[in-house]
Image (cartoon, rainbow, N blue to C red):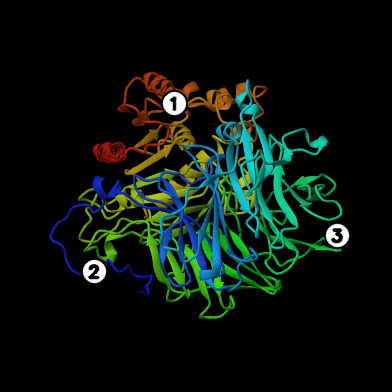
Amino acid sequence: MSMPLIPPASFTNKPHKAATPWVDGAYLTAPQKQLSEVRSRGEWVFWHQKNPGQNGCVMAQSPSGAIRALTPPEHDVGGSLHYGGAGWDVQVVPAVNRTTLQNNDAASAIITVVFADRRQGGLFALHIAAGADKDLPAPTPLLEAAMAAQGRFGGICLAPDAKRLFCVMETPHPHARLADDSSLVEISLEGPGKGRLVQRTKPTHQGGADFHLTPTLSYDGQWLAWVEWDAPNMPWTATRLCAMALCGPGAGEKTILDDGQEGGHRQRHSLIEPRFAPDENTLYVLSDRCGYWTPECHHIQEGLWQQRSLPAAPGEVGMPPWVLGYVSYLPLGRGNVVARVLNEGQPSCWLLEAGKVWRPLEAPGFTPAQAPTLLAGAAGQRQAQWAWLNEGTNQPVTLLRGPLAAPHILATAGELPAGLTADDVATPRWLRVPDGQGSFIGALYWPPATGPHCVKARDHGATPPMVVRVHGGPTAQASGAFSPKVQWWTCRGFAVLDVNYRGSTGFGRAYHQALEGRWGELDVEDCIQAARWCVTQGLAAADGLFIRGSSAGGLTVLAALARSNLFKGGTSLYGVTDMSALAQDTHRFEARYLDGLVAPWPAGRALYQARSPLSWPERIKAPVLFLHGDADQVVPLAQTETMRKALGSGPMHVYPGEGHGFRTPWVVADSMQRESEFYRSLL
């Protein structure tokens, strides 16, 4: 069945008698599939899927259209490094010679899946006859028990011949959690073993690195490439691009293709997502040396690497790698590259043709969440076959396959309630808010929805109240993709403003690096300025502004309330109130993160204290709602309790057994209802 992407099939124009908000607690917490990491091998499509209440699994659609799970339900497929992702890979090889499938008969092929298990630990492999509909074979452990139990795995890359894999492995230090080892390892699929160490954590002058990311293999299996970096850098500030021959002269010797610094002042730049082209010895990587992430390439000829220039993409390509496995672009061969591009935070898709010219890749409703993967045909042709995750502004994420203009549905994350009209679902506008200094602040604005399943926040006045959302990270970005949590407010008569304050990605290096040393200042200024501008433009009522944020965003909320009387009230969800505590108690990936955002710790202790809301509760005059879980190990409940006590009054609710980030369905629904009632009481 082909699918017109806009409007959603469930929209109708029928009137509805009820005047109640269509996003209630039940819809907000309705079970949703999690779809991610779409890949293709020939005309096979693979993706990661987590069904409600079940473990993560690898799904596949064959060229004939049959869909099935490839991993057993007792295994929870997924990476355990950092915030997860890239915990599996797959190859389809002919049963005879085990070389990568290129339009071979599917019935004569073998699918090899390798994966990490997030719950049990370890790495596993499965060999499945393509087209078989029998029960799955039992996965084969690839590591000895001791190594499997200790290691955390991610960035899994399976060789084209499916005989070995490469991945990043972290093992705990016996006495210092933040000194865990990070290693690149090679593991054979021929039988259980310890694997071969490619590179491990050690001082840079000895050829090592603190962190490794995204190992990738050339299509002939002769070259391995990856990126690495050292603390206190983060992968979006400065990394190195490395390569290693796996056979022939120089095998096993690391070559640094780009050290992430250049010029007389050794200016830093970030390199992420290395990927080899399928038909040539060309390695692509995203570099922000020109001011934003855009593809660059390195070509190997007669054992020597040479960098080749490419025209810069028409916007930023790439996302900060909090979660592994994100695909911002894909080399297609013959100099062609497809990429998801962000222009001032707004996404579009572009095709680099023959390494010379970027052209838009467009179709009605085509809004890929990542770069689409090409299945058949030439990329620029109308009937070319693609597979991609589509994140529209007015419907849940959908996995699609086919021509861009007439795809078929493979899977959907969720459904809209039956009977909705198009007016019931608010869609965003991308704003350029003047910052008063000759530049701008990026933001997304959703007006209140006006359909029959919506209500007004108050009866008088045409200008709506507005909820300002502060995204986390702070190195992240607000997205215009459909979100039930945004629709919760718009169907209740509130406008929503999601601010991409300085420090956000999607606007180039200078924009996100502007927050260096200024967290707790520039982000606060930008949220205040964006909300004030919306009032002057008639987008929000001056007496109906609220601000909300979670974790790091909670700190921005409290600081905004302290610096301005613009807001009627705010909500801090498990928010940071003590920067010093955050600097001292975090996981390895973020151990030196605040060195760049605030100041080196502990030398900058005084600055941490000055930026912490616990140091100036008397400045906050507006009411604050605090919501927190008593099992939070990231921002302990004691921080919120101390802050609320210092304020002297205000509503607070503690959820028993809930950790950092509300996940229990009734807690999610209850917290949103409490927040809604809190704002209404202040209007």
| Residue position for label 1 | 619
Circle 2 SS class: loop
Quadrant housing the N terminus? bottom left
| Amino acid type indicated by mark 2 | Thr
Image quarter for residue 208? Answer: top right
Image coordinates for residue 215, horizontal then vertical, percent = 67, 50
Q: Which mark is residue 494?
A: none
Q: Which of marks 2 and 1 is nearer the N terminus?
A: 2
Image side of residue 588 versus residue 677, left or right: right
| Residue position for label 2 | 12
Task: Bin the neighbour count of mark 1 within 10 Å (Cα to Cα): few under 14, some 14-19, many 20 and up.
Answer: some
Q: Which of marks 3 and 1 is nearer the N terminus?
A: 3
Asked whether disc 2 touches disc 3, contact meaning CB atoms under 8 Å apart, the reply is: no
Circle 3 SS class: loop
Task: Bin the neighbour count of mark 3 within 10 Å (Cα to Cα): few under 14, some 14-19, many 20 and up.
Answer: few
| Residue position for label 3 | 303
Residue at mark 3 to residue at mark 1: CA–CA distance: 64 Å
At x 32%, y 67%, the residue is: 8
| Amino acid type indicated by mark 1 | Arg
Image coordinates for residue 359, horizontal then vertical, percent = 61, 74
